[in-house]
Image (tube, grey):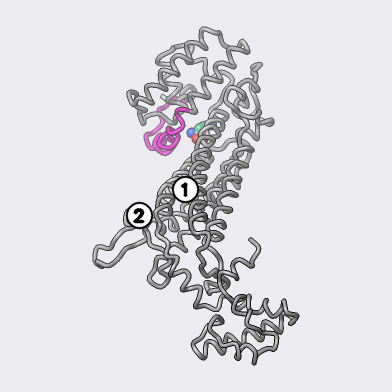
């Protein structure tokens, strides 16, 4: 029997029930639904809206339901419309009339808006923990490979020398901003909608501040219509999650390139690679590829919810039930990706030798050669041209700027002296740059 059975003279069709149900998704919020209900009951009693006895009966029964759910001794039958209906139904079975009083001064609209916030608060903490672990792995790599020189690229063409430390530091900064974005979204989300009722507020002397405090919110959602009808906090978190996936996907793309025979900069640990069913020689970077591929799901979730929300008149509309699949799914995906990505990165084998070799081959010290002349007084644009000419000579003769004889340098410009070899030494090029 649905919560709203009173005005109907016929039972709803099974098709309606199945289509309408959100239990498959929102049962994950059972803890938060119970936690929110316990706080609501405490407030109702403190405000004199229900008796202390009723509150005690409600609290005891809800705690019983919670521990049985945690222990796996109580199942959630799929006949319920959603988690809110299940918790209230089960409570009423156990606490009778007291249970029936719980929904005083409450609607599922403010209830679900509170539950999602409480649930996502927990998920934000989990994601943040994973991002922090990832940053630790990156920092360890930075320390270990502080002196490993590799080519930095633009347009995927060798550009200037960098150290692996700088490379890892770049991703570390990105993930730091991701942590910050999540915590920023969390800050704006952490206001309590309970006490808003269906949309217009409630006719009881509720103490909204008390409920908010009991649930660890920073305050109440001031406008009851807004409280039950916006999901901007989900959208913010979905954008933060999408950006995390952009970062992870770019990183994955580089890992995939770097373990190809063309680069050979790294090798993945066997435990975090896969093989081919036909080609015995293959060792594939499936984890990185899947992370790159799964980014699409998360961007899709953001698009889904933006589209769900964009045409909705105030306040609650059933369309909004689609929010949870989108946002919970995105959290699941990002969490799964980070969980696989972190140990893959942690066990990566770095070939400093191949990185150094690639650095020596691409004239990535040409800017430094031009800077050498510029520092001796040659205007940069002229220095650039002279160096370009030297690169052309090197290419023709199969030489590098390190091996080009001094006579060739001197022929190109009288400003060149023996110390040019120090200036184009890769380690010095890296050192010369401000971090
Ligand atoms: N299952 C619903 C959801 O997730 C709960 C709110 C139902 N409210 C309503 N007015 N039918 O959005």
* Labels 1 & 2 near each other (Cβ < 8 A): no
Residue 180 occupies which quadrant of the picture? top right
| Whether residue 22 can be seen here | yes
Let me know if residue 203 is in the magenta part: no
Q: Secondary structure at mark 1?
A: helix
Residue underneath mark 1: 334
| Pick the front one: 209 or 133 | 133
In the displayed structure, 33 sits above or below 373; it is above
Q: Nearer the viewer, mark 1 or mark 2?
A: 2
Q: Which residue corresponds to the image point at 56% horizontal and 72% vertical from the top-left?
A: 426
Q: Which residues are magenta?
A: 8-31
Q: Position of residue 279 (x, y in %)?
A: 26, 68
What's the mark number on residue 272? 2
Q: Report the front residue among 260 and 78.
A: 260
Residue under the image location 32 percent in, 63 percent down: 283
Q: Report the predominant secondary structure element of the magenta stretch.
A: helix
The question of residue 16 being in magenta is answered with: yes
């Amino acid at each position: 029997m649905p919560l709203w059975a009173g005005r109907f003279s016929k039972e709803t069709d099974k098709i309606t029930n199945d289509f309408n149900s959100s239990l498959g998704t929102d049962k994950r919020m059972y803890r938060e639904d119970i936690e929110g209900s316990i706080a609501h009951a405490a407030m109702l009693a403190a405000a004199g809206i229900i008796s202390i006895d009723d509150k005690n009966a409600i609290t005891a029964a809800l705690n019983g339901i919670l521990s049985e759910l945690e222990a796996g001794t109580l199942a959630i039958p799929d006949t319920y419309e959603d988690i809110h209906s299940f918790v209230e139904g089960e409570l009423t079975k156990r606490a009778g009339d007291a249970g029936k009083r719980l929904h005083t001064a409450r609607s599922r609209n403010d209830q679900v808006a509170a539950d999602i916030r409480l649930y996502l608060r927990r998920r934000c903490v989990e994601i943040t923990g994973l991002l922090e672990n990832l940053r630790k792995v990156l920092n360890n790599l930075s320390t270990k490979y502080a002196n490993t020189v590799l080519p930095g690229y633009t347009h995927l063409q060798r550009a200037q020398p960098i150290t692996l430390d700088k490379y890892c530091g770049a991703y570390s900064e990105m993930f730091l901003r991701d942590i910050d974005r999540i915590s920023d979204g969390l800050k704006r989300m952490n206001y309590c909608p309970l006490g808003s009722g269906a949309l217009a507020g409630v006719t009881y002397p509720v103490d909204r501040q008390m409920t908010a405090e009991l649930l660890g919110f920073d305050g109440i959602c001031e406008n009851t219509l807004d409280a039950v009808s916006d999901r901007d906090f989900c959208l913010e978190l979905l954008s933060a999650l999408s950006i995390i996936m952009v970062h992870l996907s770019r990183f994955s793309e580089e890992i995939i390139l770097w373990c190809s025979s063309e680069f050979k900069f790294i090798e993945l640990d066997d435990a975090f690679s896969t093989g081919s069913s036909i080609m015995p020689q293959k060792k594939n970077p499936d984890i990185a590829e899947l992370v790159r591929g799964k980014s699409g799901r998360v961007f899709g979730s953001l698009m889904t919810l933006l589209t769900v929300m964009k045409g909705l008149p105030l306040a609650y509309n059933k369309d909004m039930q689609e929010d949870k699949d989108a946002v919970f799914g995105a959290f699941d995906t990002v969490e799964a990706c980070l969980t696989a990505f972190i140990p893959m990165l942690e066990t990566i084998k770095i070939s400093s030798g191949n990185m150094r070799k690639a650095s020596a081959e691409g004239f990535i010290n040409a800017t430094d050669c031009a800077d050498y002349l510029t520092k001796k007084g040659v205007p940069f644009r002229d220095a650039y041209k002279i160096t370009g000419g030297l690169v052309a000579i090197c290419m023709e003769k199969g030489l590098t700027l390190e091996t080009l004889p001094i006579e060739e340098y001197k022929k190109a410009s009288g400003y060149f002296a023996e110390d040019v070899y120090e200036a184009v030494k890769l380690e010095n090029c890296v050192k010369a740059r401000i971090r």
